Image (cartoon, helix red, strand yellow):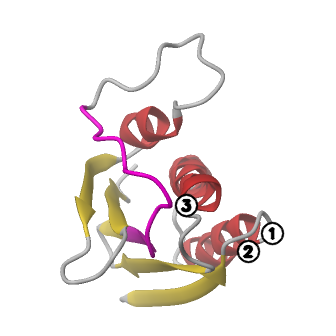
């Protein structure tokens, strides 16, 4: 079975829980274990929070999730930042920092984290994947 979700969401705090709950309901319906669903929900919440906090040049963002029997693949796409983006080198913020650990959390709880600029448009794509095998 394959599930594809595509959401265009307002860039506000209420949109992150909606994205998490919508994807979680689909994963639960497919029989994905609680632990794997929790990892995906945490990663998706962090990616959405990053857009909500930093992508001020856009009023909306997109979440695209593709789920099959083996993997969940997620892209969180923003419409641009109002300042120059900071390149992420994989190390992230210090553990005692108040902000900046979201990408570290996504990397820790998923696989295949990539951040890239959108082709021919403003903004960035946070791409991550998670195996559904427990």
Most distant residue in the left direction = 119
**Nearer to me, 18 or 67:** 18
**Mark 3 or mark 2: which comes first in sequence?**
2
Q: Quadrant of residue 64?
A: bottom left
In the image, 46: left or right of 122?
right
Badge 3: few (under 14), some or many (20 or more) residues near its Cα, within 10 Å?
many
Q: Residue at x 33, y 75 (%)?
A: 69
**Mark 1 or mark 3: which comes first in sequence?**
1
Return the residue at label 3: 51
Q: Is residue 50 above or below residue 63?
A: above
Task: Give the image location of residue 111, x and y in percent.
Answer: 29, 47
Q: What stretch of residues is rendered in magenta?
A: 74-89
In the image, 16: left or right of 96?
right
**Label of residue 14 in the image:** 1
**Nearer to me, 105 or 79:** 79
Q: Quadrant of residue 67?
A: bottom left
Return the residue at label 2: 18
**Nearer to me, 109 or 52:** 52
Q: Residue at x 51, y 64 (%)?
A: 32
| Magenta-span inclusion, residue 79 | yes
In the image, which is nearer the foreground, mark 1 or mark 2? 1
């Amino acid at each position: 079975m394959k599930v594809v979700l595509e959401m265009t969401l307002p860039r506000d705090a209420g949109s992150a829980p909606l994205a998490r709950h919508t994807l979680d309901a689909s994963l639960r319906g497919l029989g994905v274990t609680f632990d794997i669903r929790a990892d995906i929900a945490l990663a998706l919440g962090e990616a959405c929070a990053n857009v909500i906090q930093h992508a001020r040049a856009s009023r909306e963002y997109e979440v695209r999730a593709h789920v099959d029997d083996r993997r969940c693949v997620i892209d969180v796409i923003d419409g641009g930042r109002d300042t120059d983006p900071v390149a992420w080198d994989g190390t992230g913020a210090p553990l005692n920092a108040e902000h900046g650990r979201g990408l570290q959390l996504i990397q820790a709880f998923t696989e295949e984290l990539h951040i890239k600029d959108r082709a021919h448009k403003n903004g960035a794509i946070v791409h991550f994947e998670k195996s559904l095998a427990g």
